[in-house]
Amino acid sequence: MSEKSNTPEIKKGLVGVYADVSTISKVMPETNSLTYGGYAVQDLCESCSFEEVAYLLWHGELPTAAQLEAFRREEAAQRAISPALHRVIREFPHDGHPMDAIRTAVSFMGLEDPEAGDVSDAAQRRKAMRLLAKIPTCIAAAHRASKGLEPIEPNPAHSFGENFFNLVFGKVPQPEVLKAFDVSLILYAEHTFNASTYTARLVTSTGADIHGAITAAIAALKGPLHGGANEAVMHMLKEIGDPKIAREWLQSRFDHKALVMGFGHRVYKSGDSRVPTMRKYAEKMAEVVGDRTWMEISRILADEMLTKKNIHPNLDFPAGPAYYLMGFDIPLFTPIFVASRITGWAAHVFEQGADNRLIRPLSWYTGPEQRPVPALDAR
């Protein structure tokens, strides 16, 4: 409470509030590095596959070769979705956003899941594996349905990344593309108590099952101030179109005090530690495709923003052009985020469930004092 006003200090946006403890991830202030279970994410990108990182987030340690093989085998075996869900997906409006499609698909899978009402740790983990495996199938099926194309069946012989590309495009790209994609999945997998993750924990705290928590998290992630920023970045780059006008375009944003997407972060004040790694692989994608337009515009914007505003880019800034260069349609960028972040969300669902207390903050009322209800003819 404030001594002068006898009112509490309101932390809008919960800025600076510690809501709980967690062992899953941390931004190490001394190195400005995001870590998963103590491992710097940039090191994980160079040394591990996405599947290894998913195992780490769910179990707290990197897998042995045998554990990794078993994890991959279980995920690959769960990828198919039901004929009923395929029918539902075909009925989705073709002009609907893919994030709305995957949110609805996850909710539907909750209706179908034989363990839907079981919130024990073992059941939640089994359901999480099914979600990890099936979400890419749903994303790709909805995307293809929106284009009037038939879905492609998942191939259990494919890695997670190979499977996703094949489900969307009907083919597996070259290794350089797969590596860049895998890196993006690792970088997007987890990021402490961000908006969607906290949403998942809040829903879990009520005793709801993982499908409810993930459905809510997806709804939170869609927002342009959260996961939808990678889409907004690419729309911005396409609006600029030519590196020659990038500085002029940016100055016009400054003049109108307009938001520039892909810059700034609530946690990182000296630059997002994930950006250099993602930029490195976005540059590699530009080399593979033979088109440096988007990376050159990005370079100019980043330099100008740092010089004139002292604001650094966040992960969405290089991820947007990287996904575009991989061939993905812009509306698929945030669903790809979902396919990755299901690992972090699930880890937090497990952690919240293990030591649960209902999340229920207070609000400080500033409306009218209690008053009588006037008669209708007196209003």
Image (cartoon, rainbow, N blue to C red):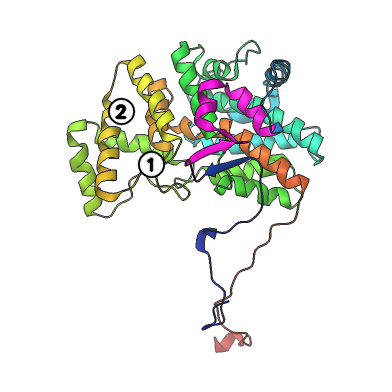
Residue denoted by label 1: 262
Q: Secondary structure at mark 1?
A: loop
Residue denoted by label 2: 295
Q: Residue at x 55, y 27 (%)?
A: 44
Residue 72 image position (x, y, % from top left): 68, 18
Name above or below for residue 171 compared with residue 280.
above
Going by the numbered disc 1, the residue's amino acid type is Gly
Foreground residue, 88 or 321? 321
Residue 66 image position (x, y, % from top left): 73, 15
Q: Specify whether 374 is left or right of 78.
A: left
- The magenta segment: 29-58
Q: Residue at x 50, y 46 (%)?
A: 29
Q: Residue at x 62, y 15 (%)?
A: 153
Residue 79 image position (x, y, % from top left): 67, 21
Foreground residue, 211 or 152? 211
Membership of 27 in magenta stretch: no
Residue 75 tag number: none
Q: What whole-number distance in Å separates the C-alpha atoms at marks 1 and 2?
A: 14 Å
Q: Residue at x 61, y 49 (%)?
A: 198
Q: Residue furthest front?
A: 30
Name above or below for residue 351 compared with residue 101.
below
